[in-house]
Amino acid sequence: MWDFETDPEFQRELDWIDAFVREAVEPLDHLLDSPYDLEDADVVRVIRPLQAQVRKRKLWACHLGPDLGGPGYGQVKLGLMNEILGRSRFAPLVFGCQAPDSGNGEILAHYGTEEHKEKYLKPLLENEIVSAFSMTEPHAGADPKMFKCKAERDGDEWVINGEKWFSSNARYATFLIAMVVTHPDAPPYNRLSMFIVPKDAPGVNILRNVGVGSEKRGHGSHGYIRYENVRVPAENLLGGEGQGFAVAQTRLGGGRIHHAMRTVGQIKKAFDMMCERVLSRETQGELLAHKQMVQEKIADTWMELEQFRLFVLQTAWKIDKYGDYLKVRKDISAIKALMPTVYYNAASRAAHLHGSLGVSNEMPFVNQVIGSLVMGLADGPTEVHKVTVARQLLREYQAHDGLFPRGHLLAERERAIKKYGHLIERDLEAEGWN
C-alpha cells in the first residue's frame, strides 16, 4: 500500500512543533549569537525553559532510541520534524537534535566505552556540552585517502600530530572526534581510525576560527586546528584500528537526510516570502505576480521544492523499510547532490524578486545563498555524490555484446514479426526496413 498521509496523532505533534518553533524559537535567531555557545548566559537562560517544554511533550532527541532517552522515531517522522526545525538556527538545539552533536552521539553510543558514555555521551545528550567532528584537512578537503594528520601508538597512549580544517563548533566544544591516519601502509579504506580528543588536551591548538561568507574574522566557529603531540589514552579509540570509515558511516547516512529536510524548511521559507512579495509590489503598472517571467520563477521554485521534498521523504521511507543505509546509498547521495541546487535556485530567485532589498543584509536571502554553497560541500562535495549515484545505478545494468544496441528498431521489428506476424494480413515485408 502506498500512502502520502501523515498519521493523525503524529500530525498533531507536527502542528504543535510548527507553532512552537514559529512563536517561541524563531525570534531567538534575531537576538542571540551561536546556539552552541553554552558559555553565553543569555543562550542558556532562554533555551533551557524551551527545552523543558519539548521534553515534557516527549519530543526531545527523537532520533535516539529508548535506551538513550529518546522515542526512536524512524526517518520519515524525523524528516517531517526537521522540515520545521530547519527554519530556525536554534530549533535543533531546543529539540536536542543539533549537528554535529547528534551524529557524534550516535558514534559514542555504538563504539564508546561505558566510561565514554558517562563522561561524554550523557552530558552531550543532555546538551550540557557540545562537540565537534574533526575530519577534513587543509590540503585534502573531504578526501580521507589524502589525509596526513596521524596518530602513533606509544605505550598506553596514542600521539596525534597534524592539521584539521573546518572543524565546526570547535571553539565551543568540550571534545572532538578526530579521524586520523594510524596505518599509513594499509589499503586506502583501512588507514584511518577515530579518536575522542578532549579539547583541553595539551597540544590541541585552534589556529583560527574560520567564518562563512561575511562573518567577521575571528567570529566564525569552524576551527583550523593543529594537533601537536596530543596524547590520548588508548581506550579513546572508537571502533577498531583502521575502522575510521566504518565508524564515520554511523553518523553520515541519517545526518544527510536531516540536512536535506532542514534545507526543505529554508527553501519553503524563501518560497513563502517570494510569493508574498510578488503579490505586494507593483512595477510598470501591474503587480509583479501578473508578469509571466515572475510566474515562471514561482512555478519553477514550487516544482523543484515539491520534487525534492518528496524524493527526500521517499528516501527516508526506504531507510525505515530496509533498516540498511547501504541499500539506500544512491538515494542518499542523490538528495545530497540535488540539495544545493534547489536551495540556491529558491534563495537567488527570492533575492531577485525583492530587488535591492533582497540582496541587502536586511533580508535572509544572501545568507541562504551562502548556505546553499555550504550544502554543496558539507558531508562530501556534490561531485562525489553524483559519482556514487552513477556507479550505484550502473550496477543495476549489464553490457550488451551485440553489434547494434538493445532497442535497435530493426531488431525490435523482427522480434515483433516473429511474435505476431502470423496474425497480421498486410505485407509486413513491403512495409519493413529491408
Image (cartoon, grey):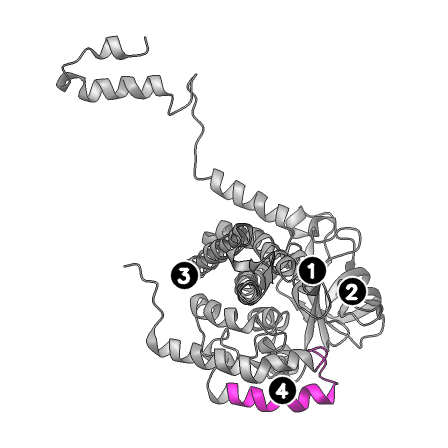
Name the N-terminal-most of marks 1 and 4.
4
- Count residues near mark 3 (Cα–Cα under 10 Å), then give few for <14, some for 14-19, many for 20+: some
In the figure, is residue 216 to the left or right of 124?
A: right
Alpha-carbon distance for marks 2 and 3?
38 Å
Alpha-carbon distance for marks 1 and 2?
9 Å
**Amino acid type indicated by mark 4:** Ile
Asked if labels 2 and 1 touch by Cβ distance under 8 angstroms, the answer is yes
Range of the magenta residues?
Answer: 32-54
The residue wearing badge 3 is: 317
**Amino acid type indicated by mark 1:** Ile
- In terms of secondary structure, where does tag 1 sit? helix
Whether residue 158 is visible to the viewer of this picture, yes or no, is: no
In the figure, is residue 367 to the left or right of 269?
A: right
Check if residue 317 falls in the magenta segment. no
The residue wearing badge 2 is: 214
Mark number, residue 47: 4
- Count residues near mark 2 (Cα–Cα under 10 Å), then give few for <14, some for 14-19, many for 20+: few
The residue wearing badge 1 is: 370
Which numbered mark, 2 or 4, is in the foreground of this view? Answer: 2
Q: Main secondary structure of the magenta part?
A: helix
**Amino acid type indicated by mark 2:** Ser
